[in-house]
């Protein structure tokens, strides 16, 4: 099911006033400021929908990506979303933490996944990229998160060469990842 916004309501055959009226009558559900879904739409993660709607290049990263890949037991307080550095972080009503990543490395390890219950997709970083990013940004996310994710990834059969290939392409990631791999090996 596609989201509706006041600016795109006409494509769905609704005027702006009809969109707002449908929301007041309960036929549309307001999931965030200016973003609506049909009330009978299947259950979906509203933060994912809001991030993907506000920024088409939104990419789930850090602890949220590790949680998606089941590499951590940590439940993030907010959805960690990366956008290219220099982009304006959108105002959001959901629990979304916007992070700005370097444009030259933004697409490394990035893939698109469908948002369950909708016809939208959102970017997410691979397990290897997510682990390298948590080591790179360990002062923000904590060293324990990176170490535990790395241990779980290795336990599942992760290949250190793949991780080092990604880490060597990211600033400030190669050395801490290599040191952690040496300690754990």
Image: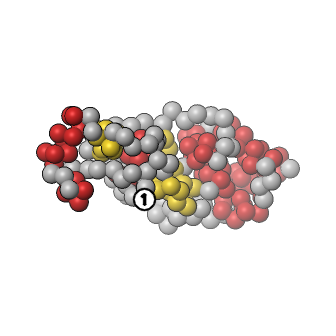
Residue 149: give x, y in percent of width and height: 70, 44
| Total numbered labels | 1
Measured along the vertical axis of the image, is residue 78 above or below residue 108?
A: above
State left or right for residue 26 relative to residue 97.
left
State left or right for residue 152 relative to residue 32.
right
Identity of the residue drawn at 43% across and 51% down: 118
Residue 161: give x, y in percent of width and height: 77, 63
Identity of the residue drawn at 50% across and 44% down: 80
Instruction: Report if residue 23 is visible in the image.
Output: yes
Most extreme residue toward the right, as rendered? 185
- Residue 164 falls in which quadrant of the image? bottom right
> Which residue was labeled with disc 1?
57
The chosen color scheme is: secondary structure
Is residue 184 or residue 46 the one in the foreground? 46
Residue 93: give x, y in percent of width and height: 34, 37
Q: Secondary structure at mark 1?
A: loop
Identity of the residue drawn at 39% across and 43% down: 41
- Residue 91 falls in which quadrant of the image? top left
Identity of the residue drawn at 26% across and 34% down: 26
- Residue 18 falls in which quadrant of the image? top left
């Amino acid at each position: 099911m596609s989201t509706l916004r006041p600016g795109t309501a006409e494509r769905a055959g609704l005027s702006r006033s009809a969109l707002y009226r449908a929301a007041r009558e309960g036929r549309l559900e307001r999931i965030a400021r200016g973003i609506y879904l049909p009330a009978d739409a299947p259950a979906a993660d509203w933060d994912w929908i809001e991030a993907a709607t506000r920024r088409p290049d939104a990419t789930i990263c850090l602890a949220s990506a590790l949680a998606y890949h089941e590499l951590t037991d940590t439940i993030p307080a907010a959805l960690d979303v990366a956008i290219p550095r220099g982009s304006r972080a959108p105002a959001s009503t959901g629990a979304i933490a916007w992070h700005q990543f370097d444009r030259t490395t933004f697409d490394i390890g990035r893939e698109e996944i469908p948002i369950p219950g909708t016809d939208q997709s959102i970017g997410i970083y691979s397990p290897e990229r997510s682990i390298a990013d948590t080591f790179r940004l360990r002062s923000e996310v904590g060293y324990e998160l990176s170490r535990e994710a790395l241990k779980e990834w290795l336990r599942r059969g992760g290949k250190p060469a793949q991780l080092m290939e990604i880490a060597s392409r990211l600033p400030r990631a190669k050395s801490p990842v290599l040191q952690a791999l040496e300690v754990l090996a």
